[in-house]
């Protein structure tokens, strides 16, 4: 079994995938953490030193490696992962995918707190953040909506979302 959780930044992919892994007794992998380990660099450093294009190439390479492996896991990917290269096609071919759908207000509340740790957001003033999220989410929703399943995560606990995913399995 390979499950991939997709969605916008701060939709809860990593937390929910850890909960799912715990409940299902299989391994959890966070794609960004996996890339950092393989490259011995933080994502922030890759963006700063090499640029987003280099990061997206690495992301595609490691996503393909994981999806083609024989191991079972729950994979949480970055918000942009499904939107570049042939990543969404790979996810659909090799795994069961779940789009964790959060509304703009939920995302804004979460991201305004942690934006300094997010390379794509760190330079955006708070006054422009909601507009950025809205536009970005609209652009990416085409890819997210291709997922095998869609789960509304607004006003739900990590446990509730994990249980909903397990029910769909």
Image (cartoon, rainbow, N blue to C red):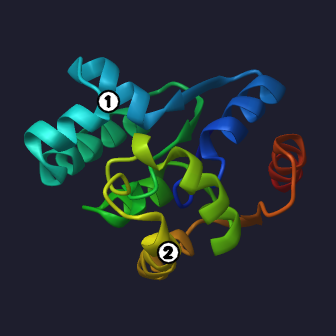
118 w.r.t. 9: above or below = above
At horizontal 27% and vertical 47% (from top left) the residue drawn is 60
Left or right: 120 as drawn, with respect to 131:
left
Nearest to viewer (mark 2 / mark 1): 2
Q: Quadrant of residue 100?
A: bottom right
- Label 2 crowding class (10 Å Cα cut-off): few <14, some 14-19, many 20+? many
Left or right: 164 as drawn, with respect to 58:
right
Q: How many marks?
A: 2
At horizontal 41% and vertical 80% (from top left) the residue drawn is 139
* Closer-to-camera residue (119/70): 119
| Position of the N terminus by quadrant | top right
Residue 169 spot, x, y in % from top left: 80, 50
Q: Which mark is first along the chain, 1 or 2? A: 1
Q: Which mark is residue 35?
A: 1
Q: Which mark is residue 137?
A: 2
114 w.r.t. 38: above or below = below
At horizontal 72% and vertical 40% (from top left) the residue drawn is 16
Residue 74 spot, x, y in % from top left: 61, 35
* Closer-to-camera residue (70/45): 45
Q: Which mark is residue 15?
A: none
Q: Quadrant of residue 116?
A: top left
42 w.r.t. 76: above or below = above
SS at mark 1 in the image: helix
At horizontal 54% and vertical 38% (from top left) the residue drawn is 75
- Label 1 crowding class (10 Å Cα cut-off): few <14, some 14-19, many 20+? many
Residue 62 spot, x, y in % from top left: 30, 36
């Amino acid at each position: 079994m390979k499950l991939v959780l997709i969605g916008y930044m701060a939709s809860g992919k990593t937390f929910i995938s850890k909960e799912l892994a715990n409940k299902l007794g299989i391994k959890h992998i966070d794609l960004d953490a996996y890339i950092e380990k393989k490259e011995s660099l933080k994502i922030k450093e890759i963006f700063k030193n090499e640029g987003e294009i280099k990061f997206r190439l690495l992301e595609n390479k490691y996503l393909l490696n994981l999806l083609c492996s024989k191991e079972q896991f729950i994979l949480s990917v970055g918000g942009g992962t499904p939107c570049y290269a042939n990543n969404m096609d790979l996810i659909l071919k090799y795994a069961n995918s779940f789009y964790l759908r959060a509304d703009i207000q939920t995302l804004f509340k979460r991201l305004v707190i942690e934006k300094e740790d997010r390379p794509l957001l760190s330079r955006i003033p708070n006054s422009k953040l909601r507009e950025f999220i809205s536009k970005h989410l609209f652009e990416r929703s085409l890819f997210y909506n291709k997922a095998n399943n869609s789960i509304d995560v607004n006003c739900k606990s990590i446990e509730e979302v994990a249980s909903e995913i397990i029910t769909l399995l």
